[in-house]
Amino acid sequence: MPAAQGTALYLENITKTFGTHVAVDDVSVRVPTGSVYGFIGPNGAGKTTTLRMVIDIIRPDHGAIEVLGTRNLPEIRSRIGYLPEERGMYKKMRTLEFVSYIGSLKGMSPRAARERGSALMERYGLGRWQTATVDALSKGMQQKLQFISTIVHDPELLILDEPFSGLDPVNVEAIKETILQSRRDGRTVIFSTHMMEHAERLCDALFMIHEGRKVLDGTIQEIKSAHGDRAIHLTCYGASEFIRQLPYVIRMREYGNDLEVFISEETPPQAFLRDIVDRLKISRFDVTEPSLYDIFLEQVAPARRHQIAADGTLISTSPAGQDAPQSATPATQPDDESAAGDRPPPSTPTQGD
Protein backbone atom coordinates (compact mmCIF):
# COMPACT_ATOMS: atom_id res chain seq x y z
CA MET A 1 0.00 0.00 0.00
CA PRO A 2 1.50 3.39 -0.98
CA ALA A 3 1.89 6.10 1.66
CA ALA A 4 -0.68 8.88 1.89
CA GLN A 5 0.13 12.38 0.65
CA GLY A 6 1.95 14.45 3.23
CA THR A 7 3.91 11.44 4.47
CA ALA A 8 7.69 11.76 4.73
CA LEU A 9 8.30 8.18 5.87
CA TYR A 10 6.16 5.06 5.69
CA LEU A 11 7.28 1.74 7.13
CA GLU A 12 4.99 -1.14 6.23
CA ASN A 13 5.36 -4.33 8.28
CA ILE A 14 9.15 -4.31 8.17
CA THR A 15 11.12 -7.14 9.77
CA LYS A 16 14.87 -7.60 10.13
CA THR A 17 16.68 -10.58 11.58
CA PHE A 18 20.36 -11.33 12.14
CA GLY A 19 20.74 -15.08 12.46
CA THR A 20 18.18 -16.13 15.06
CA HIS A 21 17.92 -12.64 16.56
CA VAL A 22 14.86 -10.64 15.49
CA ALA A 23 16.04 -7.03 15.67
CA VAL A 24 12.86 -5.47 14.18
CA ASP A 25 9.61 -7.39 14.18
CA ASP A 26 6.71 -6.43 11.87
CA VAL A 27 6.90 -2.67 12.47
CA SER A 28 4.66 -0.16 10.70
CA VAL A 29 5.03 3.62 11.17
CA ARG A 30 3.82 6.68 9.25
CA VAL A 31 5.71 9.97 9.79
CA PRO A 32 3.93 13.13 8.52
CA THR A 33 5.82 15.68 6.48
CA GLY A 34 6.95 18.70 8.47
CA SER A 35 6.84 16.98 11.85
CA VAL A 36 9.40 16.17 14.52
CA TYR A 37 9.02 12.44 15.19
CA GLY A 38 10.81 10.67 18.00
CA PHE A 39 11.99 7.08 17.81
CA ILE A 40 12.37 6.05 21.43
CA GLY A 41 13.16 2.87 23.27
CA PRO A 42 15.71 1.34 25.61
CA ASN A 43 19.20 0.56 24.41
CA GLY A 44 19.18 -2.49 22.16
CA ALA A 45 15.48 -2.13 21.27
CA GLY A 46 16.01 -1.85 17.49
CA LYS A 47 15.96 1.93 16.93
CA THR A 48 19.25 2.10 15.05
CA THR A 49 18.48 -0.98 12.98
CA THR A 50 15.21 0.64 11.92
CA LEU A 51 16.92 3.90 10.96
CA ARG A 52 19.59 2.04 8.99
CA MET A 53 16.86 0.38 6.96
CA VAL A 54 15.25 3.76 6.32
CA ILE A 55 18.45 5.11 4.74
CA ASP A 56 19.16 1.86 2.88
CA ILE A 57 22.35 0.85 4.69
CA ILE A 58 20.69 -2.50 5.34
CA ARG A 59 17.54 -3.97 3.78
CA PRO A 60 14.52 -5.41 5.57
CA ASP A 61 13.84 -9.13 5.24
CA HIS A 62 10.13 -8.41 4.86
CA GLY A 63 7.96 -5.34 4.38
CA ALA A 64 8.34 -2.09 2.46
CA ILE A 65 9.85 1.35 3.10
CA GLU A 66 8.78 4.55 1.37
CA VAL A 67 10.77 7.75 1.93
CA LEU A 68 9.82 11.17 0.51
CA GLY A 69 7.28 9.55 -1.81
CA THR A 70 9.43 6.81 -3.32
CA ARG A 71 10.55 3.27 -2.62
CA ASN A 72 13.64 3.77 -4.77
CA LEU A 73 15.76 4.87 -1.83
CA PRO A 74 19.08 5.50 -3.65
CA GLU A 75 17.50 8.24 -5.77
CA ILE A 76 16.61 10.42 -2.76
CA ARG A 77 19.77 10.05 -0.66
CA SER A 78 20.82 13.62 -1.45
CA ARG A 79 17.56 14.83 0.11
CA ILE A 80 18.30 13.14 3.44
CA GLY A 81 20.69 14.12 6.20
CA TYR A 82 21.72 11.24 8.46
CA LEU A 83 23.67 11.52 11.72
CA PRO A 84 24.72 8.03 12.84
CA GLU A 85 25.05 7.07 16.48
CA GLU A 86 28.63 5.89 15.92
CA ARG A 87 30.65 8.86 14.74
CA GLY A 88 32.85 8.23 11.67
CA MET A 89 35.07 10.86 10.06
CA TYR A 90 38.36 11.15 8.17
CA LYS A 91 40.63 12.05 11.08
CA LYS A 92 43.44 13.64 9.02
CA MET A 93 41.21 15.86 6.89
CA ARG A 94 40.90 19.52 7.77
CA THR A 95 37.55 20.22 9.34
CA LEU A 96 36.12 22.57 6.72
CA GLU A 97 37.39 20.30 3.96
CA PHE A 98 35.55 17.40 5.57
CA VAL A 99 32.26 19.31 5.77
CA SER A 100 32.68 20.53 2.18
CA TYR A 101 33.43 17.01 0.99
CA ILE A 102 30.26 15.64 2.57
CA GLY A 103 28.27 18.49 1.01
CA SER A 104 29.68 17.64 -2.42
CA LEU A 105 28.65 14.00 -1.96
CA LYS A 106 25.11 15.30 -1.46
CA GLY A 107 25.15 17.26 -4.72
CA MET A 108 26.40 20.70 -3.63
CA SER A 109 28.95 22.63 -5.67
CA PRO A 110 32.37 22.86 -3.94
CA ARG A 111 31.97 26.62 -3.45
CA ALA A 112 28.45 26.36 -2.01
CA ALA A 113 29.49 23.52 0.29
CA ARG A 114 32.48 25.47 1.56
CA GLU A 115 30.50 28.69 2.17
CA ARG A 116 27.64 26.90 3.89
CA GLY A 117 30.06 24.75 5.93
CA SER A 118 32.04 27.78 7.07
CA ALA A 119 28.86 29.59 8.16
CA LEU A 120 27.66 26.56 10.12
CA MET A 121 31.03 26.12 11.82
CA GLU A 122 30.88 29.75 12.94
CA ARG A 123 27.35 29.23 14.22
CA TYR A 124 28.29 26.17 16.28
CA GLY A 125 31.46 27.64 17.75
CA LEU A 126 34.00 25.93 15.48
CA GLY A 127 34.90 28.94 13.35
CA ARG A 128 38.51 29.18 14.49
CA TRP A 129 38.99 25.44 13.94
CA GLN A 130 38.27 25.45 10.20
CA THR A 131 41.87 24.71 9.24
CA ALA A 132 42.52 22.18 12.03
CA THR A 133 42.51 18.47 11.32
CA VAL A 134 39.57 16.46 12.62
CA ASP A 135 41.72 14.53 15.10
CA ALA A 136 42.79 17.83 16.73
CA LEU A 137 39.22 18.35 17.98
CA SER A 138 37.84 17.11 21.27
CA LYS A 139 35.20 14.39 21.20
CA GLY A 140 32.40 16.91 21.74
CA MET A 141 33.73 19.16 18.99
CA GLN A 142 33.95 16.20 16.60
CA GLN A 143 30.31 15.43 17.34
CA LYS A 144 29.37 19.00 16.49
CA LEU A 145 31.37 18.76 13.28
CA GLN A 146 29.56 15.62 12.21
CA PHE A 147 26.22 17.24 12.96
CA ILE A 148 27.25 20.17 10.76
CA SER A 149 28.14 17.77 7.95
CA THR A 150 24.69 16.19 8.36
CA ILE A 151 22.83 19.45 7.74
CA VAL A 152 25.24 21.22 5.37
CA HIS A 153 23.17 20.38 2.27
CA ASP A 154 19.91 21.58 3.89
CA PRO A 155 18.09 18.22 3.68
CA GLU A 156 14.32 17.78 3.44
CA LEU A 157 14.45 14.85 5.87
CA LEU A 158 16.80 14.92 8.82
CA ILE A 159 17.47 11.60 10.61
CA LEU A 160 19.44 11.88 13.84
CA ASP A 161 20.49 8.83 15.84
CA GLU A 162 21.11 9.90 19.47
CA PRO A 163 22.05 13.47 18.42
CA PHE A 164 22.55 14.82 21.95
CA SER A 165 24.97 12.17 23.14
CA GLY A 166 28.14 13.66 24.63
CA LEU A 167 27.24 17.32 23.99
CA ASP A 168 27.46 20.08 26.58
CA PRO A 169 24.24 21.97 27.49
CA VAL A 170 25.02 24.94 25.22
CA ASN A 171 25.33 22.76 22.14
CA VAL A 172 22.36 20.61 23.12
CA GLU A 173 20.29 23.79 23.01
CA ALA A 174 21.81 24.76 19.65
CA ILE A 175 20.84 21.41 18.12
CA LYS A 176 17.36 21.62 19.65
CA GLU A 177 16.92 25.01 17.98
CA THR A 178 18.09 23.56 14.65
CA ILE A 179 15.49 20.80 14.97
CA LEU A 180 12.71 23.27 15.76
CA GLN A 181 13.77 25.63 12.96
CA SER A 182 13.73 22.71 10.52
CA ARG A 183 10.12 22.05 11.49
CA ARG A 184 9.23 25.73 11.10
CA ASP A 185 10.73 25.57 7.60
CA GLY A 186 8.50 22.60 6.72
CA ARG A 187 11.20 19.95 6.95
CA THR A 188 10.80 16.60 8.67
CA VAL A 189 13.01 15.53 11.55
CA ILE A 190 13.27 12.00 12.94
CA PHE A 191 15.53 11.45 15.90
CA SER A 192 16.14 8.51 18.17
CA THR A 193 16.79 8.90 21.85
CA HIS A 194 16.38 7.17 25.17
CA MET A 195 16.28 10.59 26.91
CA MET A 196 12.58 11.12 27.44
CA GLU A 197 12.82 14.82 28.32
CA HIS A 198 14.21 15.56 24.85
CA ALA A 199 11.44 13.59 23.17
CA GLU A 200 8.71 15.20 25.27
CA ARG A 201 9.89 18.75 24.66
CA LEU A 202 10.68 18.48 20.95
CA CYS A 203 8.42 15.90 19.33
CA ASP A 204 5.01 16.29 17.76
CA ALA A 205 4.63 12.51 17.90
CA LEU A 206 6.69 9.46 18.64
CA PHE A 207 7.11 5.79 18.01
CA MET A 208 8.41 3.49 20.74
CA ILE A 209 10.10 0.18 20.01
CA HIS A 210 10.91 -2.47 22.61
CA GLU A 211 12.54 -5.82 21.89
CA GLY A 212 12.03 -5.16 18.18
CA ARG A 213 8.28 -4.55 18.35
CA LYS A 214 6.27 -1.34 18.23
CA VAL A 215 4.61 -0.66 21.57
CA LEU A 216 3.56 2.99 21.18
CA ASP A 217 2.84 5.28 18.22
CA GLY A 218 1.00 8.60 18.19
CA THR A 219 1.09 12.20 19.33
CA ILE A 220 2.43 12.97 22.79
CA GLN A 221 -1.04 13.86 24.04
CA GLU A 222 -2.64 10.73 22.56
CA ILE A 223 -0.05 8.56 24.26
CA LYS A 224 -0.42 10.32 27.59
CA SER A 225 -4.20 10.01 27.41
CA ALA A 226 -4.10 6.30 26.62
CA HIS A 227 -1.22 5.16 28.82
CA GLY A 228 0.43 5.73 32.12
CA ASP A 229 -0.56 5.81 35.75
CA ARG A 230 -1.57 8.87 37.66
CA ALA A 231 1.29 10.59 39.42
CA ILE A 232 0.74 12.09 42.85
CA HIS A 233 3.20 14.76 43.89
CA LEU A 234 3.39 15.46 47.59
CA THR A 235 5.61 17.32 50.00
CA CYS A 236 5.69 15.59 53.36
CA TYR A 237 7.71 15.30 56.55
CA GLY A 238 8.34 12.08 58.43
CA ALA A 239 9.34 8.49 57.65
CA SER A 240 7.77 7.90 54.23
CA GLU A 241 9.38 4.59 53.26
CA PHE A 242 6.21 2.69 54.22
CA ILE A 243 4.50 4.13 51.15
CA ARG A 244 6.47 1.73 48.92
CA GLN A 245 4.82 -1.20 50.71
CA LEU A 246 1.22 -0.09 50.11
CA PRO A 247 -0.32 -2.74 47.80
CA TYR A 248 -1.59 -0.28 45.19
CA VAL A 249 1.63 1.75 44.89
CA ILE A 250 3.40 0.96 41.62
CA ARG A 251 6.52 3.02 42.25
CA MET A 252 7.81 6.03 44.13
CA ARG A 253 10.56 8.58 43.59
CA GLU A 254 12.06 10.60 46.40
CA TYR A 255 13.55 14.09 46.12
CA GLY A 256 14.21 14.93 49.76
CA ASN A 257 10.82 15.79 51.26
CA ASP A 258 9.17 15.81 47.81
CA LEU A 259 7.72 12.49 46.63
CA GLU A 260 6.31 11.34 43.31
CA VAL A 261 4.03 8.35 43.83
CA PHE A 262 2.26 6.25 41.18
CA ILE A 263 -0.79 4.30 42.19
CA SER A 264 -2.91 1.74 40.35
CA GLU A 265 -5.70 2.97 38.11
CA GLU A 266 -8.46 1.52 40.26
CA THR A 267 -7.23 3.23 43.46
CA PRO A 268 -8.76 6.67 44.15
CA PRO A 269 -6.18 9.28 45.19
CA GLN A 270 -8.37 10.00 48.21
CA ALA A 271 -7.79 6.44 49.44
CA PHE A 272 -4.04 6.94 49.23
CA LEU A 273 -4.35 10.23 51.12
CA ARG A 274 -6.35 8.54 53.89
CA ASP A 275 -3.65 5.89 54.30
CA ILE A 276 -0.85 8.41 54.80
CA VAL A 277 -2.39 11.47 56.42
CA ASP A 278 -2.08 10.14 59.99
CA ARG A 279 1.55 9.04 59.52
CA LEU A 280 3.05 12.06 57.77
CA LYS A 281 2.83 15.82 57.90
CA ILE A 282 1.66 16.78 54.40
CA SER A 283 1.99 20.28 52.97
CA ARG A 284 1.25 19.50 49.29
CA PHE A 285 -0.81 16.82 47.50
CA ASP A 286 -1.29 17.13 43.70
CA VAL A 287 -2.54 14.65 41.10
CA THR A 288 -0.89 15.12 37.66
CA GLU A 289 -0.73 13.39 34.28
CA PRO A 290 2.13 10.94 33.73
CA SER A 291 5.29 12.10 32.01
CA LEU A 292 6.65 10.38 28.94
CA TYR A 293 9.45 9.07 31.15
CA ASP A 294 6.90 7.32 33.37
CA ILE A 295 5.09 5.79 30.40
CA PHE A 296 8.44 4.63 29.01
CA LEU A 297 9.23 2.78 32.25
CA GLU A 298 5.86 1.08 32.34
CA GLN A 299 6.15 -0.10 28.73
CA VAL A 300 9.70 -1.40 29.20
CA ALA A 301 9.03 -3.14 32.51
CA PRO A 302 5.28 -3.49 33.10
CA ALA A 303 3.98 -4.64 36.49
CA ARG A 304 7.35 -3.98 38.12
CA ARG A 305 8.42 -1.62 40.84
CA HIS A 306 11.11 0.83 39.78
CA GLN A 307 13.68 2.22 42.17
CA ILE A 308 14.63 5.69 40.98
CA ALA A 309 17.58 7.76 42.17
CA ALA A 310 17.15 11.42 43.02
CA ASP A 311 18.50 12.42 39.60
CA GLY A 312 15.90 10.26 37.84
CA THR A 313 18.24 7.35 37.03
CA LEU A 314 16.63 3.91 36.98
CA ILE A 315 18.61 2.06 39.68
CA SER A 316 16.79 -1.27 39.55
CA THR A 317 13.46 -2.98 39.03
CA SER A 318 11.78 -5.75 40.91
CA PRO A 319 8.43 -7.55 40.51
CA ALA A 320 5.50 -5.75 42.08
CA GLY A 321 5.15 -6.77 45.69
CA GLN A 322 8.90 -7.28 46.19
CA ASP A 323 11.42 -4.74 47.39
CA ALA A 324 13.90 -3.55 44.79
CA PRO A 325 17.47 -4.41 45.81
CA GLN A 326 19.67 -1.54 46.89
CA SER A 327 22.30 -0.97 44.22
CA ALA A 328 24.38 1.88 42.93
CA THR A 329 24.72 0.29 39.51
CA PRO A 330 22.19 1.51 36.92
CA ALA A 331 20.02 -1.25 35.50
CA THR A 332 20.63 -0.98 31.78
CA GLN A 333 20.49 -3.18 28.74
CA PRO A 334 23.29 -3.45 26.20
CA ASP A 335 23.14 -0.60 23.74
CA ASP A 336 22.26 -1.04 20.08
CA GLU A 337 25.96 -1.31 19.29
CA SER A 338 26.50 -4.36 21.48
CA ALA A 339 23.18 -6.18 21.15
CA ALA A 340 24.02 -9.59 19.75
CA GLY A 341 23.30 -9.66 16.07
CA ASP A 342 21.43 -6.36 16.17
CA ARG A 343 23.37 -4.84 13.33
CA PRO A 344 26.51 -5.26 11.26
CA PRO A 345 29.70 -3.22 11.86
CA PRO A 346 29.49 0.42 10.73
CA SER A 347 31.26 1.73 7.65
CA THR A 348 33.59 4.72 7.85
CA PRO A 349 32.70 7.40 7.19
CA THR A 350 28.98 6.59 7.44
CA GLN A 351 28.06 9.89 5.80
CA GLY A 352 29.40 8.61 2.48
CA ASP A 353 27.05 5.63 2.28
Image (cartoon, grey):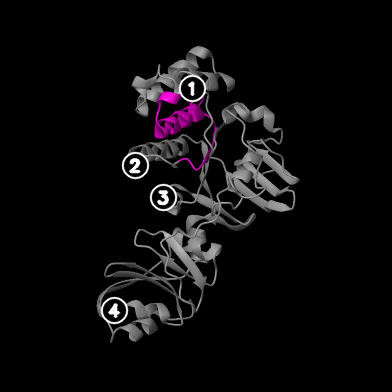
Closer to the chain start, of discs 3 and 1, is 1
How crowded pointer 3 is (Cα within 10 Å; few <14, some 14-19, many 20+) is rated as few
Magenta extent: 135-163
Q: Is residue 93 left or right of residue 126?
A: right
- Using the rendered view, name the quadrant where residue 209 is placed: bottom right
Residue under label 4, please give it. 239
Q: Which residue is mark 2?
A: 169
Residue 295 horizontal/vertical position (percent):
49, 63
How far apart, in angstroms, are the residues tagged by discs 3 and 1? 29 Å
User: In the rendered structure, which disc, 4 or 3, sits on the residue that comes first in sequence?
Assistant: 3
Alpha carbon distance from label 2 to label 4: 36 Å
Question: Would you say the residues marked 2 and 4 are in contact, meaning their CB atoms lie under 8 Å apart?
Answer: no
Q: Nearer the viewer, mark 3 or mark 1?
A: 1
Label 2: few (<14), some (14–19) or many (≥20) C-alpha neighbours in 10 Å:
few
> Helix, strand, or loop for circle 1?
helix
Q: Look at 58% across and 21% down and name the residue there.
A: 105
Count of numbered circles in the view: 4
**Would residue 107 be visible to someone looking at this image?**
no
Residue 99: give its label.
1
